[in-house]
Image (spheres, rainbow, N blue to C red):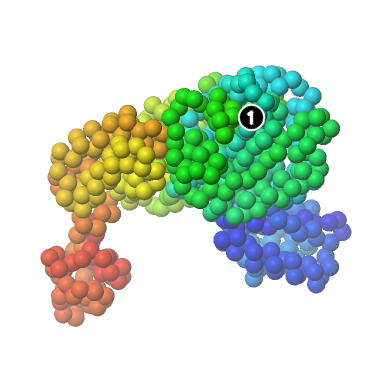
Amino acid sequence: MQTISVKVGMASCGMAAGASEVYQKLEAYLAESKLPVSLSKTACIGMCFEEPLVEFSGAEAGRLTIGAASAETITTALDEYLAGGIPNQRIILSDKSEAIHNELISNQVRIVLRNCGVIDPESLPEYEAQGGYQALKQALKMAPEEIVDLVKASGLRGRGGAGFSTGMKWSFAQKAPGPKKYVVCNADEGDPGAFMDRSVLEGDPHSIIEGMIIGAFAMGADEGYIYCRAEYPLAIKHLEKAIADAEAAHLLGQNILGSGFNFELHIKEGAGAFVCGEETALMQSIEGKRGMPTIRPPFPAESGLWGKPTNINNVETWANISWIISHGAEAFRAFGTEKSPGTKVFALAGKVAGGGLIEVPMGITIRDIIYKVGGGMKTELPFKAVQLGGPSGGCIPADLLDTIVDYDSITKTGAIMGSGGMVVMDTGNCMVDVARFFLNFTQNESCGKCTFCRIGTRRMLEILTRITEGKGELEDIDKLEALAVNIIKGSLCGLGQTAPNPVLTTLKYFKDEYLAHIVDKRCPSAVCNALIRYQVIPEKCIGCTACARKCPVGCISGKVKEIHLIDQDKCIKCGACFQACKFGAIAKN
């Protein structure tokens, strides 16, 4: 019998769902049975909503992936597979037969995620077997100017949010004078609902390292930092192992591959300050100072870390580099649009059925992302909006679902591409409350250096809170817009300059909801507690008394088998009655 391969997804999402128990069960079973099965760990293929994931390959049934795997049934599934059949499990992917999510994968184009969920992220040989470090060997034979020109020709734009030309950015650092230069990977991912960087660092750390070595060679840097927040322990563990292995193989460190080129790479663990995602604040943090933005110019390419020329790109940008070197600029431009070539990684979260990580070509519509790649809506309620770009982004409404995903088109909506967080919402979401949530986040994360950001966002948050509590006034809308303009103009860094975006886009597309809260004292989505009313529906109430027994303040009256009443003056809007009623006799509006 040929050797069968079994891979268990052991990224953070998999382990949180119980993958460790599945792996341990398989490990113990194989140790006892002595079956010719190779068991290994891999990371996340992006289908976080189906974790734990186990992939079988090598038998007659071909390669297939089991979703929602359990320790109780996985050994039975393996026996069925070894016997030549398809396990009686939830088969979500298959290369030989129909499977639940084959289409969701086929609608993606994987460049950044090419190895995620495919290789063991802690194995240098497996990375090399997929062509890893071949691009580095090729780049070391090129002139640095050739590499920069190739990256320029590819049209790769920085995937951290701003979308600036990567090749142009590299050329600035390359031309900067001085013998000492740095390259930095910004892995300080802090947007609510975003986990792109974490997944790539956990699943394919060598791709980041290889990209950084190539970039350092092209720009004349001899030292680099990966700035990764400490909340990503598995990513840091995999990075540390990858760096050590690369050094041992002479792919990193002194005299790389005998070329005479030296490059040292360090990991700097961040303490979780969202503002450190801004490049000047990030550099302050690396230097051991408080992470606060500084005035530009000078830009990092002129004076960055310790006053030396520095280039900063994010995780996704670096992960594209080796692929571009190996395949060429035109191959990269074959995907995407003229001004936004290539692919984009998104973290799908919220009310979408297929929550997880995806990579799609630029130019795809938001509709196709949600329905063809994300599997559609998770709930029975219709789609309402998507929050794109995290707390610095904005909310795009249903009537703009056919907007294509590229930098210019997204910016026109009032949102931004950002690093790739995409939170899907249905009609059960209150857009005023969504704006309040994101503004609360940015207000808490403000470093406090700029008055407009520190105090202006506080004032906006106070107004939004009043509105959600039913205490808003019509003048508040004008105040929000005026504050937003001043915060954008008066803030030093991108945090403050984009903090009002969720408010401005919800005012632009969902102003009727603001008016309902202010004028009618009603939350159309029945989310804001202060504006919710729980009422008994007389024709449905059978007088079972369940609601009255669950009410913590005794505001529900009525005898057994008689219609009950809720005293609105005493009701604390806790929802206990709504949850207790099995007959749908409590209305929430």
Q: What residue sits 21% from the left and 70% below the top? A: 541
Numbered-mark total:
1
Q: Is residue 257 left or right of residue 438?
A: right
Residue farthest bottom in this picture: 560
Q: Quadrant of residue 167?
A: top right
Residue 428: horizontal and vertical position, in percent? 33, 51
Residue 2 seen in the figure: yes
Q: What residue sits 28% from the left and 39% below the top? A: 456
Residue 73: horizontal and vertical position, in percent? 66, 68
Residue farthest right in this picture: 1
Q: What residue sits 12% from the left and 65% below the top? A: 569
Q: Could you say which is closer to the camera, residue 127 or residue 292?
A: 292
Q: Could you say which is closer to the camera, residue 93 or residue 390?
A: 390
Q: Is residue 60 above or below residue 563?
A: above
Q: Is residue 456 above or below residue 177?
A: below
Q: Is residue 245 left or right of residue 227?
A: right
Residue 97 seen in the figure: no
Q: Could you say which is closer to the camera, residue 496 or residue 522?
A: 496
Residue 575: horizontal and vertical position, in percent? 27, 65
Q: Is residue 574 left or right of residue 441?
A: left
What residue would you read off at disc 1? 181
Give the residue type at disc 1: Lys
Residue 76: horizontal and vertical position, in percent? 71, 68
The N terminus appears in which quarter of the rendering?
A: bottom right
Q: What residue sits 24% from the left and 47% below the top? A: 462
Q: Quadrant of residue 319?
A: top right
Q: Crowding at label 1, few (<14), some or many (≥20) Cα neighbours within 10 Å? A: many
Badge 1 element: loop
Q: Is residue 334 left or right of residue 444?
A: right
The C terminus appears in which quarter of the rendering?
A: bottom left
Q: Could you say which is closer to the camera, residue 350 or residue 498?
A: 498
